[in-house]
Each structure stands twice: as C-alpha cells, then as structure tokens.
Amino acid sequence: MTQPHTQATRPKITYAQGDIVLVRDVERFWLGLPGHTFVGRVERSWTQADTRTVLYDVTELSSSRHRAGISPDYMRLLPPADAMHDIDTAPLSEPDTGAMTSAAVAWLRQHLAQAAATRPAQRT
C-alpha cells in the first residue's frame, strides 16, 4: 500500500541576479531562534557538484551580510508589483494626503520635484 503524498509540490523556480527575495533560515526556524527570516538580494547561483542542486548566494539587505548556499526551497520572490502597490493604488483624487501611505506621498513629492526641475523656465 502506498502512502498518499501530503506535501504540496511547488514548481521549480529559478532566481536571477538582483532579484529581491524572502529567505528563511530553516535551521533557525525549526529551532525557534529569532532572525530566521530576512529579505535579501540574489547575488549569484551555482550548482553543487555532488548533488547537482542549484543553490544561491544572497545578501541580507538589513545587514549587508553575505549568505552562501541557500536552497531555492526556502526562498520566495518578492515581486516589484507588491512593493509598489501602495504607490500604484494611491488615492490621488483625495484632497487629504493622510489617506496615502508615507511611501506614496514621498514618491509623489519626489516625482513632482523632478518634473518641476526639468520643465523649461516660464516667461513672464
């Protein structure tokens, strides 16, 4: 009698240099230690010779710490669309900027300042 397969299988995902990912240090996680999950940037991928497993080197963004040999099973892509969602959905028609997140307000102010700086001087 065969055992039912209870673990969901995920499609194999490959990450590219520069991708922003969420990484879980599985040993720290299972031991209940703090700091087991962090945001990182993929620096490179490489294949482990003896197992032919693709692993990744990642820089932990909060500390610039280099982490080597991370399995893609413990990484998840953080899509740019999620990071930019608050700006993309900012209620620009609202008169009160308090309805916008601080990131959306900061982006809008920066964008308006850049646009003003590139406009030709008006003649009076």
Image: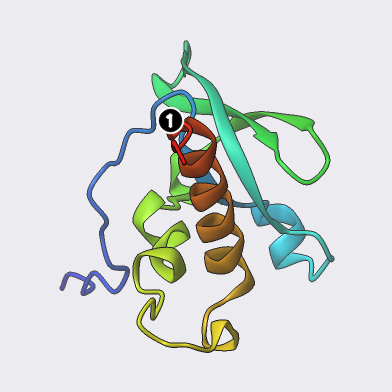
- The N terminus lies in quadrant: bottom left
Q: How many marks?
A: 1
Q: Position of residue 10 (x, y in %)?
A: 27, 56
- Give the quadrant of residue 66: top right
**Would you call the spot at circle 1 few (<14 residues within 10 Å), some (14-19), or many (20 or more)?**
few
Question: Would residue 17 be found to the left or right of residue 12 on screen?
Answer: right
Tell me: residue 45, above or below residue 41: above
Question: Would residue 109 be found to the left or right of residue 29 on screen?
Answer: left
Tell me: residue 32, above or below residue 20: below
Residue bearing mark 1 = 120
Q: Position of residue 113 (x, y in %)?
A: 57, 47
* Rendered residue at 48%/33% (across/down): 121
Inspect the image, locate mark 1, and give the three-letter code of the amino acid beneath it: Pro
The residue nearer to you, when weighing 33 against 4, is: 33
Q: Position of residue 68 (x, y in %)?
A: 67, 26
User: Tag 1, which secondary structure?
Assistant: loop
Query: Which residue lies most toward the front here?
Result: 124
Question: Would residue 6 be found to the left or right of residue 95 on screen?
Answer: left
Q: Position of residue 71 (x, y in %)?
A: 51, 38
* Rendered residue at 57%/57% (across/down): 109
* Rendered residue at 54%/56% (across/down): 107
The residue nearer to you, when weighing 94 against 9, is: 94
Query: Which residue lies most toward the left here?
Result: 1
The residue nearer to you, when weighing 59 against 92, is: 92
* Rendered residue at 33%/33% (across/down): 14
The residue nearer to you, when weighing 58 against 115, is: 115
